Image (spheres, coloured by chain):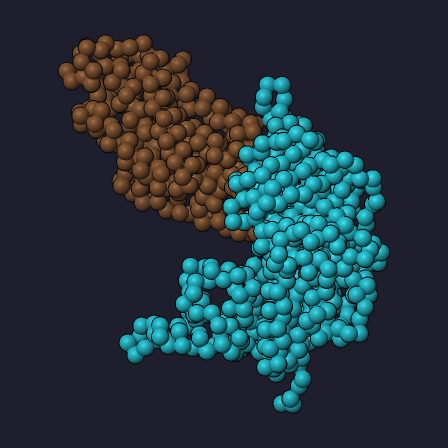
Chain colours: A cyan, B brown
Amino acid sequence: MAETEYILEATNIVKEFPGVHALKGVDLKVKKGEILGLVGENGAGKSTLMKCIIGIHPPSSGEIVFDSVQMKKYSTIDALNMGISMIQQELSPIEHRPIMENIWIGREPRNKVGLVDHQQMYKITKELLKSIGMDEDPKMLVKDLTVAKQQMVEIAKAISYQAKLIIMDEPTSAISGNEITELFSLMRKVKEEGRSIIYISHKLDEIYTITDRVVILRDGEFIASSDIDKIEVTKMIEMMVGREINDFFPKIKCDIGEVKMRVEGLSSGKKFQNISFDVRKGEILGVAGLIGAGRTELIETIFGIRKKTAGKVIIDGKEVDIKSPADAIENGMAFLTEDRRLNGIFPVLSVKINLVVANLNHLVNKSGFLSNKLIVKKCLEYIKAIQIKTPSQEQIVMNLSGGNQQKVLVGRWLMTNPEILFLDEPTRGIDVGTKAEIHKLISELAGQCKSIVMVSSELPEILGMSDRIIVLNEGRLTGVLENTKELTQEEVMKYATKRELQGENNEG
Amino acid sequence: MKANNSEKLKNLNLIFSKYGIALILVGMVILMTFLKPASFPTGKNILNVLNQSAIVGIMALGMTLVIISKGIDLSVGSVLALAGVVAASLSQTEAASIKVFENLGPLPIFIPILAALAVGALCGSISGGLIAYTGIPAFISTLGMMTVARGAVFLYTRGQPVSKLSEGILFFGSNMFKVIPVPVIVYAIMIVITALLLGYTRFGKSVYAIGGNINAAVVSGIKVKRNLVLIYIYAGITAAIASILFTGRVASVHPGAASGYELTVIAATTIGGTSHSGGIGTIWGAVVGTLMLSVLTNGFTLLGIDPYWQQIVQGMIIVGAVVLDMRKNAKKA
């Protein structure tokens, strides 16, 4: 058979689920030793296509040729043994077991008697890790690794399977800064060894940094393929969304009023120390920093989820004592959390209860029982106002798309009629179209004189939306910056990685 | 056309997944009516089935709250026994040869009832308090309570049965109110109260929220710890109410009474579709689950089948119900 330059050739892949036409004849070719970016909005068919390739869902029709072999009816294990590995977005390692057992699970080396040969396993793991530039001890427990290192262990595992094609689904959604750089340099190394990578991400700047070529999907159709250096970002987005988006950060300029909330010398154990800042009415305050800088912990402490060890919070000139989220809500605060699944949605409950859960105190009738009439009316109002796409209020929330789940959470908090909104990574993992909608909403809220504190790891978002920016590094406040046109991502990053405490931050 | 058909199929699926267990109960009733037309579908037998359901049924109501909140309460059988011996000890007549309290005549009926409720609430608040404030798993906390409460029963009674009880408490056993047995009336009242509590109060919604995602419940301003304690107190109270019916029925409470009831109660709740992964469950389901077990017992008796078979079938039903339930939930994901 003639040698081809492609490791994977998937042609005219069609996938139908009952009632849904998920893939409508998609072509996907991956060259040997290239990093291919796969982009598209949520629901474009990226995941379905990947599931077809790794053998979870057999395609309804179409042809998959991998490594010059026609693939027919195969399982994920077959795919793995053929050399296709996938690293899921949400890693699920066996956290309390060592690295080596995570890598060799199910195929542990055995000694003559048939028992697991731990020494041999240790040795081959050590070599494997070394080959990708990791010097961690193979006996280290996976739970003690950072998310980025866990990703790397997954890559090591893929290599141990002699993977020729590695699929990575949003690997950077939970890491930032140096960790991303580290991951990318490992990916380049893997590529140089002649392996191929399919890289799925919503973060277009990363697509431009790491990929060689990009394939764009929309509504289950192949839209375009291009070398990365031959496609403009605006063009790429237009192809993904199917329409032109002129304004990603539709910031409405509004008058910023007096100080709404002031935080003074706030500390919470080792997580962060001595942080002071204020936020004014109608202001969007961006909170920048690397993952682990203490941003989420700061918000959690103000909101009463974590115990503060020092400092105070002042609202409208009066010190408030917030001991629980209930107190915070009482004081007009709302908190859109970072991790929807961890502490945002109630997956098995209805859209209705997900919307009203933070507002039950105000939905009772005269006799103290919940008023279903009032609840239904409120929900209808908010579903309409923020355009939540759901067949009914009774729909189980986990059946909605990620973007719509996020809107349900936004609705939950707006219903409490808050004056101070904490938004932690409000657009993480959300596609470009919905992102712009959420940005618009945030802007409108600031326009209604609400105070917004927005944590984000995406610097374009911070720079695009904020009036002022505070920067944290390792639990310390390292900068308070006015967001002028001249402020650059590099400048913010400088503060995010700065070691010293504040005191010399007047240059911003 | 095709879309229409699949729509219909979807609806049928939906109906089955929603009412599946109830449909099976209806099927069992129809089958029994067909097999034993003279003895099964009579008013007397049906009231008998309901009467037999009351004790487990009332506890299953409390257990439903517990399991929706992603917990479990293994102590309800022992708590029933403890509340039962306390209530009985305060209702012993002069005729009793062995008495817990030597010179105590039967007290007005509200006193033993209140004492039993207090015992149930106390046990529940301890189990719930431990779960909420130390973070130990519900399984461990209530396993401890199960053992402690049973020990307390033996200590309290010195290992002797408590018997010769007053008319007041026997009334709650099998007496009739008009034609309806008193336990059936108490059960009906408890169903209504619990359904209101779960469906129409902030506490009820918070039970679902805690089981659905405890972290999100905290962020949403729900007083998770306080509500967890209340949930186990409610379970303790249902055990106490069941203990009054139990004491009235058996008229002599043995220290080993109601051993293993917790498993029947958990079985009834589980068969009724309350999910052990939390956030899912209805009072309606707990009632159907309980009735199913009662109809099964009743049916086996009427058909003259070896009662030992009943346990085997019951075990299979529990597992079957959960398998059905998981399939239904897996489809949604």
Q: Residue at x 65, y 57 (%)?
A: A496
Q: Residue at x 83, y 45 (%)?
A: A252
Q: Nearer the viewer, residue A363 or A205?
A: A205
Query: Measured along the vertical axis of the image, is residue B135 above or below residue A38?
Result: above
**Is B41 situated left or right of A345 in this image?**
left
Q: Residue at x 67, y 27 (%)?
A: A373
Query: Measured along the vertical axis of the image, is residue B214 above or below residue A185?
Result: above
Residue A410: name its quadrant: top right
Q: Position of residue A282 (x, y in %)?
A: 77, 39
Q: Nearer the viewer, residue B212 or B300?
A: B212
**Is B280 situated left or right of A473 in this image?**
left
The residue furthest bottom is A2
Q: Nearer the viewer, residue A371 or A228?
A: A228
Q: Position of residue A338 (x, y in %)?
A: 62, 49
Q: How many marks?
A: 0
Is residue A337 something one can see in this rendering? yes
Q: Position of residue B267 (x, y in %)?
A: 38, 39
**Is A178 situated left or right of A316 in this image?**
left
The residue furthest left is B97
Q: Residue at x 61, y 65 (%)?
A: A178
Q: Position of residue A393 (x, y in %)?
A: 66, 39
Residue A62: name its quadrant: bottom right
Is residue B30 something one can see in this rendering? no
The residue furthest front is A503
**Is A234 situated left or right of A88 in this image?**
right
Query: Measured along the vertical axis of the image, is residue A402 above or below residue B96?
Result: below
Q: Nearer the viewer, residue A86 or B36?
A: A86
